[in-house]
Image: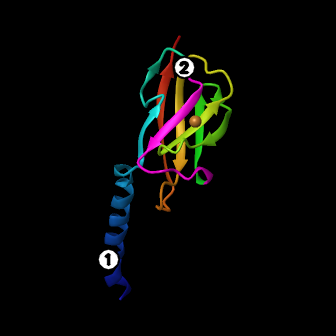
Amino acid sequence: MYKALKPLVLVLGLSALAACSNQTTYSPFLEAEPAPGEALTRAPRTLRLFFNALPDVEQSSLRLIGAGGEHQLRGLHTMAADDLMIEIMDAVTPGTYTVEWSTVVADDPTQYSGSYEFTFSE
Ligand SMILES: [Cu+2]
């Protein structure tokens, strides 16, 4: 009995793995300011991310990471345009930056997350 179950467990395991590797195919994230991959020539003062539905601010977070570590951000909010927005408190110096986001949108209880980079040079 146990031996007969083994192939089934293996198949289920593989399909679970396939489901995991497919998780990047759906994301509520649409675009952002600064945009993913954007090369800025002026330091950004805010981050604004757009989604395909209204984010729940209480269940959302944004992080900005530069060469010197994590930047101080303040006042996560939505402008009610299916977006999340936050103010960058400390100086953004030339370099490459990573934005990490996590959110729940509309009535979907799934916690989605992702990240992207932009660069800034004077
Ligand atoms: Cu705003």
**Ligand 1 quadrant?**
top right
The x, y position of residue 58, in whole percent, is: 62, 53
Q: How many marks?
A: 2
Secondary element type, mark 1: helix
Q: What is the span of residues highlighted in magenta in the rendered image? A: 44-58
Q: Residue lying at the far bottom in this picture: please name it.
A: 1
Mark 1 vs mark 2: in front:
2
Q: CA distance from mark 1 to mark 2?
A: 50 Å
Identity, as a three-letter code, of the amino acid under mark 2: Gly
Q: Which comes before the other along the chain, label 1 or label 2?
A: 1
Identity, as a three-letter code, of the amino acid under mark 1: Leu
Secondary element type, mark 2: strand
The x, y position of residue 15, in whole percent, is: 33, 65
The x, y position of residue 74, in whole percent, is: 68, 36
Question: Looking at the rendered structure, which numbered label has been put on residue 95?
Answer: 2
The x, y position of residue 28, in whole percent, is: 42, 49
Q: Residue lying at the far front in this picture: please name it.
A: 80
Which residue is found at the position 53% from the left and 16% from the top? 42
Which residue is found at the position 63% from the left and 32% from the top? 87
Q: Callout 1: few (<14), some (14-19), or many (20+) C-alpha neighbours within 10 Å?
A: few
**Quadrant of the frame with the N terminus:** bottom left
Circle 1 sits on which residue?
8
Which residue is found at the position 60% from the left and 43% from the top? 77
* 92 vs 12: above or below: above
* 50 vs 120: above or below: below
Q: Callout 2: few (<14), some (14-19), or many (20+) C-alpha neighbours within 10 Å?
A: some
Q: Is residue 86 left or right of residue 17?
A: right
